[in-house]
Each structure stands twice: as structure tokens, then as C-alpha cells.
Amino acid sequence: MSETLALYALTRQGTALARKLALELGGTVHAPRRFADDGVHPFESLPELVAETFGAFDGHVFVAAAGIAVRCIAPHLKGKADDPAVTVLDQQGRFAVSLLSGHLGGANDLAVRCAAVTGGQAVITTATDTAGVPSLDVLARDAGMTIGNIERVKVVNGALLEGKPVQVFDPGRYLGAEGELFVPVPDPDSWRMGEPGVWVSWKDDCPDADALWLYPRVLMLGVGCRRGVSGDEIFNHVRNVFDAAGLSLDAVGGLASIDLKADEPGLLEAAQALDVKPVFYPKETLDAVDAPNPSGTVFRRVGVASVSEASALLLSGRGELLVEKTKTNTVTLAVAREKKKEG
């Protein structure tokens, strides 16, 4: 958050507070030109500025009236899965109000951090927080999971608010949902269709469209490719392999290859489409991995016997190789499941 936080002020006192917050939390301060001294970015129109910055920052702090913030951000709202955190403070810093994307975006946490800096009061209005019950979107976010059907969060959270039990199928214990309201489901046959529930899996295997689907991002891709291959070709091969294996693209947590491909545009495009940051290993590191399907052809081309399988195994922490090397004329792919961390 600290590297992608925008702060806005409209008055001299508000600018001083914004600078204080930026000093503690990190971020970029914006203020009217007449208040923009060293380190402060000047603006002429706040709505025009927010139109440029809203999608570029993970968090926004307005030291201004809440109504001003609402009018500035309203044209740019997309949905709770996409909107950044927005917090509003009065210029004395007495109240830090979580205004938008309190859970997934982190505005509740941001409000608490702002209040800690100013000595003020964080104002949190999300129902689960005020009721003191866990929120599934927060649990999923903190566990690094992808939410497959965000619209079902309110159903499960609503059940928790009413004190109803929520069934949880999580054989890998990725979510860590604990408490008397969460009822573990030991196997798929024990799942009760139509009742509030959470299904945690790295496969596309949930039988209940009404369940909340959560995907731990534990599937690591090892990719090799020819020079000049397009990002679409790589992505399409990944999708085809996942469809055949019953794996979920929402569970992809990383992509790796040999460092000779670090500047390959198609590979970088595919990583972006999969929402992962690519990792590139040197030949010596890949060569130390005992891959099940070494290739003499690959060795002659790049000097190492395995790229896709070795990369997947390395990125997964020497986890389980779920899909051995598959290939088209231009792309090779292997998939490994991340080794579960202890503790």
C-alpha cells in the first residue's frame, strides 16, 4: 500500500496533514498549486486529477469533506473486486473514515493506519466488522486467494451475521477459517447443496453454483517457448491444459522460465494476462533440478535439458508436479502445486 498511495488535500492545514501521513505511510501528496511546496504535486482540478489517478493507485486518502471525495470517485467505480481503497479524513485528523473497498481494497486497514498517525478515530461501517464476525472476503484476501464469484460473498457473510453455520470444504486447509460458525466438510460427498458454504480448491470441481468459490494461488507454471511466440499462443495453451486437467486458472500463482526468455514479449504478455509476475532462472539453477522428462533438443537450443518442468518445480518449492511437460509447436508447459508451508 505504501508504494501506491495517493493523498489529496484542499487546504493549507489539510496539506500539512497529508504530508504527515505520507511521511509515515508513504505515498504521493497532491494539493492545490498555492499550497504545493517541495514534495507536493500541484493540481488545478481535483476531479480531473482523480480521473487520472484513481486506477493508478491501490489506495486514496482524501483530507477533505466526504462529499467531495464521493463526487470525485463516483464516475470511476467498477465494483468491490476492482475498486481501490478510499479513506477520508477531516483536516484535523480526528476521524479517518473507510469510504470505499473496506475489505478487499483494504480501506478499513488504511483508515486504522491513518488514525494511528493522527491520533484520531478510525470509522469502520462494514457490517461484519461492527458485528465482530469474520468476513470471507477479508479471510480470502489475507490468505492470498482468488474469489471466483464475488457476488456470493454477501450471502456467506450474511449467514455469519445471522449466526448461521457456514460449511467449509477446504481439504488443504488454505483458508484457515476457524470458529463455531464454520463447519468443516471432510469430503465432497458430505457437502450440503443449497446451504451457505465456502468451497476452497485449486481445481474447477465445486458442484454447487451457490457456494462461494475460493482458489488458493498455488499452481506454478513452468513455460518454455520459441522466439517470437505471441502471448495469446502461450495463454491458449495454458488454458487448454488446465481445461483438460480440471485445474482452475484462478489458482495460478506464478510463472517461470529460463533467463534467456526474460525479454520475450509473448511470455511477459501471458504473465500479465494471468496476473502474475514472471520469474526467470539461470541455466545453472535449472540444470540442478531432476526433471522427469529431460530433452536433448532443449539442451542443444538453450544449454539445459529442462525448462518447463524444472521451472515449475523450482517456483513451487519442489512441490508436486501435477502436469508433466506438454507442448505445442511453439510452447512447452508444466504445472506444479506449491509445497505447503508449515505453520
Image: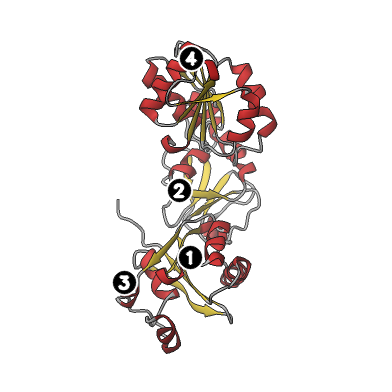
Residue 76, percent across and down?
Answer: 67, 34
Residue 285 is tagged as 3
Q: Disc 3 or 2, which lies upstream in sequence?
A: 2
Measure the C-alpha gap from mark 1 to mark 3: 19 Å
The three-letter amino acid code for the residue at tag 1 is Asp
Question: Which residue in the protein does label 1 denote?
Answer: 263
**In front: 163, or 52?**
52
The three-letter amino acid code for the residue at tag 3 is Thr
The three-letter amino acid code for the residue at tag 4 is Gly
Badge nearest the viewer, 1 or 3? 1
Is residue 74 rendered to the left or right of residue 26? right
**In front: 127, or 94?**
94
Residue 14 is tagged as 4
**In front: 122, or 161?**
122
Label tally: 4
Question: How crowded is the residue under tag 3: few (<14 C-alpha within 10 Å), some, or many (20+)?
Answer: few
Measure the C-alpha gap from mark 4 to mark 3: 52 Å
Question: Is the Cβ of the residue at disc 3 closer than 8 Å to that at disc 2?
Answer: no
Residue 236, percent across and down?
Answer: 62, 69
Residue 18 is tagged as none
Q: Residue at x 44, y 30 (%)?
A: 109
Question: Which residue in the protein does label 2 denote?
Answer: 144
Measure the C-alpha gap from mark 2 to mark 4: 35 Å
Badge nearest the viewer, 2 or 1? 1
Residue 47, percent across and down?
Answer: 65, 25
Q: Disc 2 or 1, which lies upstream in sequence?
A: 2
SS at circle 1: loop
Give the quarter of the image for residue 337. bottom left
